[in-house]
C-alpha cells in the first residue's frame, strides 16, 4: 500500500484499480509477484556488450549491412524524442540511417530538435509531412525512402540499447537467410528505470495469432516489407500485429530469428500501450480484426475474442469444416468410477460427429468394471482392446493405435474429466492449421482449479516440467501465455490429440526405454527431430485427477536419467522457453544468468589486449 500511494516513484491509483476491476485481489497479487520476483535480479546492463566486445565481434563479421531505422514522429514530448534519437546515435554499430518522419506535429520544438540532429549527423534523414496521415502512412513513407537492406521500426518515445544493432548484425551473419529478426524487450519509466523484461519464445505462428509477441525490437528485410506493401491503414494500435501476421504467411519459420536479449526499452508514459492497454482503447478491436483477417486469408474458420484479463490477448475458437475420424483411447485397470466419469464427460461435452471411444482393458479383475465394459461394448458405444500384461503405458497405447484406422488418435488418461464445450473441435481445428502439427493438447487442471499442465517445457527442474503448474486457472500466466494458443516442445499424453501418420512415422511410444514415465516427452522430442510440431490450445480444458489409480513409479529416477542421457542437448535448449528464465520452477518466475559468452562463444577467447 505504501508503494502504491506514497512511494518516491508513485504509481497512479487508476492503474491499480483497473487491475483490481479486471481480476480482483488475486490478479493484483499475481501482478505484484510477477513484477517483483524478477525485479531484484534484473539489471538491463548486466548482459549488454561492452564497447570492446562489440568491436571484437564486428571484426569477425563479414556482412555489415546498412540498417534503416524508421521513426514516425507525432506530437511527442521533446525529451522522449531526444532520448530516442540519442539511443540510435549511440549505437556501437555505425552503419545505419535514421529516418524521422514528422507527421505534421506542428510543434516547433520538435522541428528544431529534428533539424539540429540532421545537421550534425548526415545519417539522419528527415521528412515533414504537410498533413497528418497516421501511423501507417507515415511508416510507409519511411519505408519508401529507406536505402538499407534491412528496416527497423522504432517508436518516437522508446530507446534502443547501445548494442542493439550489433546483436542484429551478429544474428544475420549466423543466419544469412534471415528475413525477420526480433528481440526481447523491457519497460522504461519516465525516470529511466528499466523493469518488467519480456523474455520471449522463439517464433511460433500460432502464438502470433493470440499475441503480438514479436513486437519490439523488430527488423525486417527491406524487400519483404515492400512485397507486402508495408503497413496497412485501418489497424491503428495493432498495425504492427497485422504486418507481422501477413509476413508470417510468406516468410518460412526458419528465416524468422529470435535474439534472446533485451535490445529495446518501451517507454511507460500516458498514451503509450506500455502504460496499459487502456491508453489505446481501439487497439484490441484492431487486433481482433487483424487476426480474423489472417484466419480468413488462410481459409480457417474461427471466432476471435479478447481474453478477459488482457484485451490484446486473443483467443481463437476454431470451427472446423472437415471432421476427420478421431479415436479416443483410454487405458484402465478397474477404476470404474473414474472411467465412467471420464467417458460420461466425453459424451456430455462432445458434439464432434466422427469419433469413437477405445478402452484398453489392462488385466482388470473388478466384476463391476468388467460388467460395465461388456455392456458398453454390446451397445457399440466403445471398442475394447485387451492388454493382459503388467502395466506398460507405451506398449498398450501402441497396440491400440494399431487397432484403429482413424486420422487422429487421442490419448486420454482414465482420470481425465472434460469440462469445456467443443473441446474436440478445438483440438482438431488447431491440428488443421498446418500438416506439420502432430500433437495438440489443452489446459489441464487439478480439482482445486490450479494448473496441472499448460504444455511441456524442456529443462525445467532437471528434465521437463509443465508450464504454469500450480498457478490458478484465472490468472494470465507469464505475459498471458497460460491462455494463448502457441507451439510448445511437448504435450502430456494425459490428454493429447496425435496425428496417427506422424505417430507411426516415429514408431510410436518407446515401450522398452520409456514404458511408463516420460514416454510423452520422449515422443514429442522425436517428433520434433522429424520436423513435426506440438501445439497447446487453452480453449480445451479438463480436470486431471492425477495418479488416482496408480502409485508413483519407484523407477522414476531411472527414467529421468534416461531422458538426460538421450536428450541432454534438447533439454538444455527449449526454443519456447527463453534462456534468461529460471529453471527451478514451472511458473516462469525468476531469472538465470545467460552470459554473453554462452550466447557468443567467440567472446570467451577475446584477446586480452582488446578486452
Image (spheres, rainbow, N blue to C red):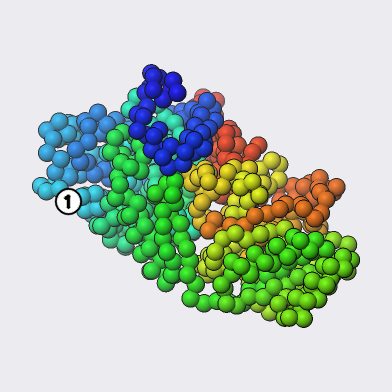
Q: Is residue 280 visible?
A: yes
Judge the density around disc 1: few (<14), some (14-19), many (≥20) Cα neighbours within 10 Å.
some
Residue at 44% x, 20% y: name it.
Answer: 2
User: In what quadrant of the picture does the N terminus appear?
Assistant: top left
Question: Which residue is pictured at 85% across the width and 61% down the height?
Answer: 391
The total number of labels drawn is 1
- The part of the image, by quadrant, that contains residue 340 is bottom right
Horizontally, residue 455 falls left or right of residue 150, namely right
User: In what element is the residue under mark 1?
Assistant: loop
Considering depth in this image, is 534 or 63 the residue closer to the camera?
534
| Residue 77 shown left or right of residue 303 in the figure | left
Which residue is farthest left? Answer: 130
The structure residue drawn at horizontal position 41% and vertical position 53%, both measured from the top left corner, is: 306
Residue 385 figure quarter: bottom right
Above/below status of 399 relative to 307? below
Residue 427 showing in the rendered view: no
The answer to whether residue 260 is left or right of residue 402 is left
- The foreground one among 284 and 184 is 284
Q: Circle 1 is placed at which residue position? A: 133
Q: Position of residue 339 (x, y in %)?
A: 74, 64
Residue 162: x and y in percent read 39, 32
Q: Residue at x 58, y 43 (%)?
A: 472
Q: Is residue 561 above or below residue 52?
A: below
Image coordinates of residue 483 in percent, x first then y, are 51, 51
Does 52 appear above or below 560? above
Coordinates of residue 77 in the picture (x, y in percent): 22, 32
Is residue 267 shown above or below 1? below
Amino acid at each position: 500500500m505504501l508503494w502504491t500511494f506514497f512511494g518516491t516513484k508513485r504509481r497512479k491509483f487508476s492503474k491499480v484499480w483497473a487491475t483490481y476491476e479486471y481480476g480482483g485481489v488475486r490478479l493484483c497479487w499475481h501482478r505484484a509477484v510477477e513484477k517483483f520476483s524478477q525485479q531484484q535480479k534484473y539489471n538491463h546492463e548486466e548482459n549488454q556488450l561492452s564497447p570492446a566486445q562489440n568491436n571484437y565481434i564486428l571484426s569477425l563479421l563479414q556482412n555489415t549491412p546498412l540498417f534503416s531505422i524508421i521513426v514516425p514522429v507525432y506530437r511527442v514530448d521533446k525529451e522522449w524524442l531526444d532520448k530516442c534519437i540519442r539511443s540510435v546515435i549511440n549505437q556501437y554499430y555505425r552503419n545505419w540511417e535514421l529516418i524521422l518522419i514528422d507527421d505534421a506535429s506542428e510543434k516547433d520544438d520538435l522541428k528544431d530538435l529534428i533539424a539540429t540532429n540532421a545537421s550534425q549527423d548526415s545519417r539522419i534523414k528527415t521528412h515533414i509531412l504537410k498533413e497528418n496521415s497516421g501511423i501507417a502512412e507515415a511508416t510507409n513513407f519511411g519505408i519508401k525512402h529507406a536505402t538499407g537492406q534491412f528496416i527497423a521500426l522504432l517508436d518516437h518515445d522508446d530507446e534502443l540499447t547501445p548494442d542493439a544493432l550489433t546483436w542484429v548484425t551478429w544474428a544475420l551473419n549466423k543466419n544469412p537467410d534471415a528475413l525477420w529478426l526480433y528481440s526481447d524487450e523491457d519497460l522504461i519509466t519516465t525516470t529511466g528505470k528499466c523493469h518488467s523484461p519480456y523474455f520471449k519464445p522463439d517464433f511460433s505462428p500460432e502464438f502470433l495469432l493470440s499475441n503480438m509477441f514479436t513486437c519490439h525490437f523488430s527488423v525486417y528485410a527491406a524487400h519483404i516489407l515492400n512485397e507486402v506493401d508495408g503497413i496497412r491503414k485501418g489497424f491503428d494500435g495493432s498495425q504492427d500485429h497485422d504486418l507481422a501476421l501477413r509476413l508470417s504467411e510468406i516468410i518460412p519459420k526458419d528465416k524468422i530469428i529470435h535474439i534472446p536479449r533485451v535490445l529495446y526499452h518501451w517507454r511507460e508514459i500516458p498514451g503509450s500501450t506500455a502504460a496499459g492497454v487502456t491508453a489505446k482503447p481501439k487497439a484490441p478491436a484492431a487486433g481482433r480484426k487483424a487476426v480474423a483477417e489472417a484466419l480468413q486469408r488462410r481459409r480457417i474458420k474461427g471466432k476471435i475474442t479478447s481474453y478477459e484479463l488482457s484485451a490484446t490477448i486473443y483467443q481463437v475458437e476454431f470451427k472446423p469444416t472437415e471432421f476427420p475420424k478421431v479415436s479416443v483411447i483410454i487405458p484402465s485397470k478397474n477404476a470404474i468410477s473414474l472411467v465412467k466419469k471420464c467417458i460420461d464427460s466425453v459424451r456430455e461435452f462432445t458434439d464432434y460427429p466422427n469419433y469413437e471411444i477405445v478402452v484398453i482393458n489392462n488385466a482388470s479383475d473388478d466384476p463391476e468394471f468388467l460388467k460395465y465394459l461388456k455392456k458398453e461394448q454390446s451397445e457399440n458405444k466403445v471398442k475394447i482392446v485387451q492388454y493382459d500384461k503388467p502395466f506398460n503405458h507405451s506398449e498398450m497405447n501402441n497396440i491400440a493405435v494399431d487397432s484403429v484406422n482413424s486420422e487422429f488418435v487421442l490419448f486420454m488418461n482414465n482420470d481425465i474429466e472434460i469440462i469445456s464445450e467443443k473441446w474436440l473441435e478445438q483440438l482438431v481445428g488447431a491440428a488443421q492449421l498446418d500438416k506439420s502439427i502432430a500433437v495438440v493438447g489443452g489446459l489441464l487442471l487439478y480439482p482445486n482449479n490450479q494448473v496441472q499442465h499448460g504444455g511441456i517445457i524442456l529443462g525445467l527442474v532437471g528434465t521437463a516440467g509443465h508450464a504454469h503448474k500450480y498457478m490458478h486457472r484465472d490468472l494470465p500466466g507469464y505475459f498471458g501465455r497460460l491462455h494463448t494458443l502457441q507451439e510448445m516442445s511437448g504435450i502430456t499424453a494425459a490428454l493429447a490429440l496425435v496425428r496417427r501418420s506422424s505417430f507411426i512415422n516415429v514408431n510410436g511410444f518407446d515401450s522398452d526405454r520409456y514404458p511408463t514415465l516420460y514416454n510423452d516427452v520422449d515422443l514429442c522430442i522425436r517428433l520434433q527431430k522429424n520436423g513435426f510440431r506440438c501445439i497447446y490450445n487453452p480453449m480445451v480444458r479438463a480436470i486431471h485427477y492425477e495418479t488416482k489409480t496408480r502409485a508413483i513409479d519407484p523407477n522414476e529416477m531411472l527414467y529421468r536419467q534416461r531422458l538426460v542421457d538421450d536428450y541432454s542437448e534438447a533439454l538444455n535448449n527449449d526454443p519456447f522457453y527463453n534462456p534468461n528464465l529460471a529453471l527451478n520452477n514451472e511458473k516462469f518466475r525468476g531469472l538465470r544468468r545467460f552470459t554473453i559468452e554462452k550466447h557468443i562463444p567467440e567472446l570467451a577467447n577475446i584477446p586480452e589486449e582488446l578486452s
